[in-house]
Image (cartoon, grey):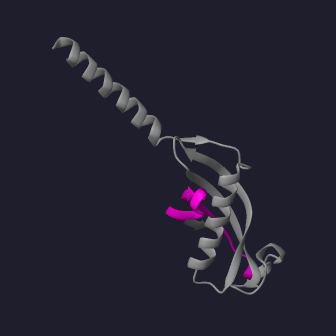
Amino acid sequence: MFREVLLLGGLIVLGTHVWTLHKEFVDISKNLDYFVASVHFAVAWFNEDNVEEYTYKLLGVGQAQQKTWTMIFLMDLEMNRTTCKKHGDDIDSCPLQDGAGQKMVRCTFVVDARPWFSQFSLLNSSCSAG
């Protein structure tokens, strides 16, 4: 009986340790294929959800992290408003607005990637004017 209690206690401690690791985000390479695809998804989602008529272009990636044992990515992105309207032009070739139209945003996104199904889901986002 005592041995079974010790074994159960050990499993609980081990399970708690694995669960704690499971919840943590760790730094990853910004060039990781699935992370890059998640960044593209986040920018596209931002542009679709944004009420403005102009698209935003990615300027840079700050923090790049992955939740351990998952394909959930946390990213800090810096974007700037372009001169291109939504659904009109290739965003990569759009020049950035300058002067009074210039607007930069910094956003943090958490994206759940299921690349083997070509499926991405936005779990959380927050943006502020930069």
Name which residue lies at 25% across and 23% down: 8
Instruction: State the quadrant of the C terminus.
Output: bottom right
82 up-or-down from 18: above or below: below
Instruction: Return the residue found at the far front.
Output: 116
Q: Can you give x and y, in whole percent of width and height, for residue 44 in the image?
A: 64, 72
59 up-or-down from 98: above or below: above
Name which residue lies at 57% across and 83% down: 51
Position of 3 with respect to 41 (left or right) is left
In the image shown, does 100 or 83 lie closer to the viewer? 83
Q: Can you give x and y, in whole percent of width and height, for residue 129 in the image?
A: 62, 69
Secondary structure character of the magenta stretch overall: strand
Name which residue lies at 46% across and 39% down: 22
Q: Is residue 101 magenta?
A: yes
Identify the magenta region: 100-126
100 up-or-down from 63: above or below: below
47 up-or-down from 122: above or below: below
In the image shown, does 30 or 76 lie closer to the viewer? 30
Q: Could you tell me if residue 130 is visible in this image? A: no
The picture quadrant where one finds residue 77 is bottom right
The picture quadrant where one finds residue 97 is bottom right
Q: Could you tell me if residue 30 is visible in this image? A: yes
Instruction: State the quadrant of the N terminus.
Output: top left
Instruction: Return the residue found at the far left.
Output: 1
Marks counted in the figure total 0
Name which residue lies at 65% across and 68% down: 43
Q: Is residue 52 magenta?
A: no
Q: Can you give x and y, in whole percent of width and height, for residue 128 in the image?
A: 58, 66
In the image shown, does 63 or 67 lie closer to the viewer? 67
